[in-house]
Image: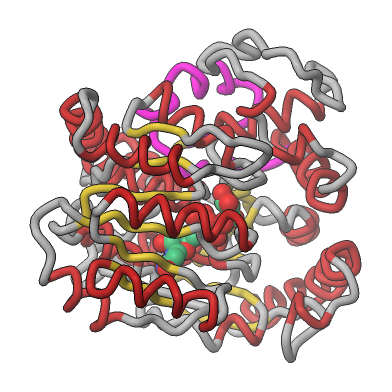
Amino acid sequence: MQNQRGVHVLVVIYPAQGHINPLIQFAKRLASKGVKVTVATTPYTIKSIHANTISIEPISDGFDEGGFKQASSLETYLESFKTVGSTTLAELIVKFNNSGTPVSCIVYDSLLSWALDVAKEFGIYAAMLLTNSASVCSLYWQINQGRLTLPMKQEALAAPMPGLPSLGFSDLPSFLTQPAKHYAYLSLILDNTGALDKNDWVFCNSFEELERELVKALMGLWPVEMIGPLVPSFYLDHQIEGDTSYGASLWKQDKDQCLKWLDSKPLKSVVYVSFGSMSSICSKQFEEIAWGLKASNMPFLWVAKEFKDEQLLEFTDSVGERGLFVTWCNQLEVLAHQAVGCFVTHCGWNSTLEGLSLGVPMVCVPQWSDQPTNAKFLADVWKVGVRTKKDEGIVTREELEKCLREVMVGERNEEIKSNASKWKEHAKRAVSIGGSSDRKIDEFIAELGKSKD
Ligand code: UDX
């Protein structure tokens, strides 16, 4: 490991699990290459981060005790983070500059575009890190540029850009199909995409092989570089010793219980079910999934953080040892376990990349945000799973059972498994030394060694 003298990267993190994970992992990757890295995030998030190769410093969102939950609305929270965050980030940079470890570059989450203004104020490099796929970001960008208009129409979009497939209405991010409902996120995202070309780098948590055609089309429009998948290296290339978790969990994990239970199950027999950190399914959907799993006769491990004991009890009694419910787990350890044969996922971008990187076939049950578009790619472009159909907004028990059978034992089982293994190999190659993503990170570090004009 080379010491990258004088290079100091400040990674600014938005405090939600699906954002903390890739940014922490990027920080660890840089640190493993000898770069001094400091992570800046909110005080209550800092308590959940355990990563010994990086330093952590607080910046404030104006709600230091409990963050988002304390704010009266999402709009209030985002506005407060922008105002108080900009000031406290600038103070942190001054502190480093005065203590002989000046900051060379700010790498910031794409939800925090005010960090770009702070970088400009100090004349230092700025890099935005996109936590969605390049495909999804390109859709937001096309709206920002007036190439696509809101509200999106019901008819399909025929190949809206090279590298994007034709997208039906149900394949589009919910922010675009229900703009009024998601106004706060949408306006933030559209503002940010307007600033993409003002950055020195736009890093995307994806890899060239996955979105090759699209990235070619984007080059020249924004300074985009694919540097993912930002998944702990233990699962891909073993570059960072002992890197088996992101090192930042907002929930307490049931680690030993999950692994012990999985150890008792046959090879590739278990269905792992999770809807990520931000989605919550309604009671009706919970029930349909539960009875679909029961009818499949397959063992399952379900992360059901939002359900009350009474609702679970009746069901768990009826499935006995065949089902395990936990409130949170180390998803990577679970996906990497030899007993897991299928991932029933909401298709959050991190879960999508984790399933692909670990070669696990998927049943897609997208909920909102970018998830419908990710599901479209998983099922129809990368062909590593199937997407459930909804009936009045609900995936029925019959539909879930049908999809589980299709993926686990149906006619397409071999094809899906073989595609999943292929993507696992591509992901591994991208982040291995000299791989497409690894080279981009090296080029970034080399550039930081030069002074910004
Ligand atoms: C959301 C969006 O859906 C996602 O696309 C966006 O880019 C970030 O915000 P989230 O709903 O949390 O994220 O889903 P996902 O992106 O899949 O992230 C969840 C993370 O939590 C994953 O890294 C996953 O490994 C982790 N996780 C989930 C656990 O560690 N344990 C669990 O039990 C469940």
Between 122 and 300, the one lying in front of the other is 300
Q: Is residue 425 left or right of residue 26?
A: left
Between 433 and 95, the one lying in front of the other is 433
Q: Is residue 326 left or right of residue 148?
A: left
Which quadrant of the rendered structure holds the C terminus?
Answer: top right
Which quadrant of the rendered structure holds the N terminus?
Answer: bottom left
Query: Is 217 rendered above or below residue 26?
Result: above
Query: Is 177 rendered above or below residue 98?
Result: above
Q: Is residue 134 left or right of residue 66?
A: left
Q: Position of residue 372 (x, y in %)?
A: 58, 36
Q: Residue at x 63, y 70 (%)?
A: 15
Q: Position of residue 8 (x, y in %)?
A: 51, 66
Span shown in magenta: 198-225
The color scheme shown is secondary structure
Which of the 4 image quadrants contains residue 155? top right
Residue 78 shown in magenta: no
Q: Position of residue 95 (x, y in %)?
A: 68, 82
Between 164 and 314, the one lying in front of the other is 314
Query: Is 177 rendered above or below residue 273?
Result: above
Q: Residue at x 85, y 47 (%)?
A: 181
Between 131 and 431, the one lying in front of the other is 131
Query: Is 9 rendered above or below residue 158?
Result: below
Q: Position of residue 198 (x, y in %)?
A: 73, 39
Q: Residue at x 54, y 88 (%)?
A: 47
**Is residue 10 visible to us here?**
no
Question: Which residue is at the far top?
Answer: 158
